[in-house]
Amino acid sequence: MPVEWTGSGPELLVPLDRDRPLRVQLELSLREGVRTGRLTAGERLPSSRALARALGVSRGLVTDTYAQLHAEGYLVTRPGSGTRVAATGHASPAAPARPAAPPPIRVDFRPGVPDLTSFPREQWSRALRRACREASAEELGYSPPHGSPVLREVLAAYLRRVRGAAADPAHTIVSAGYTQGLQLVLRSLGDVRTVAFEDPGDPDHRAIAGMLGLEVVPVPVDEHGMDVDALAATGARAVVLTPAHQSPTGVVLAPDRRQALITWAASRDATIVEDDYDAEFRYDREPVGALQGLAPDRVALLGSVSKSLSPALRLGWIIAPPRLSAAVARNKRLADLGSPGFDQLALASLVRDGQYDRHLRRMRQRYAARRAALVGALAHHAPGVELLGLAAGFHAVVPLPAGADERSVTRTALERGVGLYGMAPYRVRDGRPRLVLGFGNLTPDAISEGVAAVADLIGG
């Protein structure tokens, strides 16, 4: 029966089979440990008495083994120091050299990251404790396929009130964030094999469709949003877009294109997937209403708390067209048997009690101050630089000077300790070099410091 020693000293796996010569096995195990690097030069082995006791063998067997390996050059023995792995001879091979660590980033303009320091920890903790106290026995079981009925009621009411959505709890499905929501909807489209996406647009959208074996068709975006005429020229019967605040350009889908998009969907028996990722954070006017409110039978509205609260919660929602609702819920059940029940109840509590609204108001003020800091820093350090897409959210687009290379700019910025991010990953087709600057997780002072460090790269 194999045994092992895991006592004092280095943890040492020594399998022994009682039906085979024990000393031969012990010698082989220790010898291979040194050769493979599992036992490193200078590492102390257990005393002969301790190892013998742990393995259930005679001390003489262990002593003879140590003596043999000492003679071969694998081990060294010094009075008062015990038995150790030799530093020369058959010592373990040197570990491969590690690549040089990248320079530390002091200021990171990574887009898509909210202010992680502002998560309402106390409110969330209280809501979780309340959910633990008050959850019924039934709520401690598996969630219904659509999700917690309590949360679906609360979310539908919130989205009707704040986003102008035609939200029905019966067709609301709780998801593990937006990413899962998109997968669930795309899996539910039946015979649809071609899906259109914005170009430039979120690269994760395209990657998810590709992972599901769908054909991806890019459709250009201009200052009025997605080009619906170009969409109509494709064979797609589904489209994924961000009409309230296009990611990453920041433009809003124009009213005439909204109507044209709905007309296209009706004529093609198509589905529109609306990513409502940061529409709560608008600074120039009230948030633009959800497209879903105009055509609930054609539009699947997807949202989450990743930008409003924290990505770590992995909670989102789908307001599905009635014809897709059952299929989406079935795919959710098969994916994970439901999102965490206590978290669903806690989110319902925050929204129902008005704490979610109060948190959003605080965050709008905070992001507006950081937006102003970015505008001011660029005006001071790089006057003349154009900022686009600032009407909502917490990122902006900066066109680079003609002839500039995005990779060269971001690489040089990194050498200065500043994280900058180019537009290239968002594009399928080539376009003018641009940067996407996220400011949500940076203080005003950090924004000013970062802009000062790379002003010459941005302004040319």
Image (spheres, grey):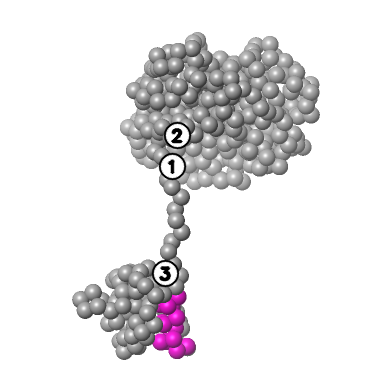
Give the image quarter of residue 245.
top right
Q: Amino acid at mark 1?
A: Pro
Give the structural element (helix, strand or loop) at label 1: loop
Give percent across and percent down for residue 261: 71, 19
Which numbered tag is attached to residue 92? 3
Which stretch did the figure color magenta?
20-33
Q: In the image shown, does 258 or 347 lie closer to the viewer?
A: 258
Give the structural element (helix, strand or loop) at label 2: helix
> Contact, CB < 8 Å: mark 1 with mark 2?
yes
Q: Amino acid at mark 2?
A: Leu
Distance (Cα) linking label 3 and label 2: 37 Å
> Looking at the image, is mark 1 or mark 2 earlier in the sequence?
1
> Contact, CB < 8 Å: mark 3 with mark 2?
no
**Mark 2 sits on what residue?**
414
Residue for point 39% across, 82% down? 72
Give percent across and percent down for residue 226: 67, 20
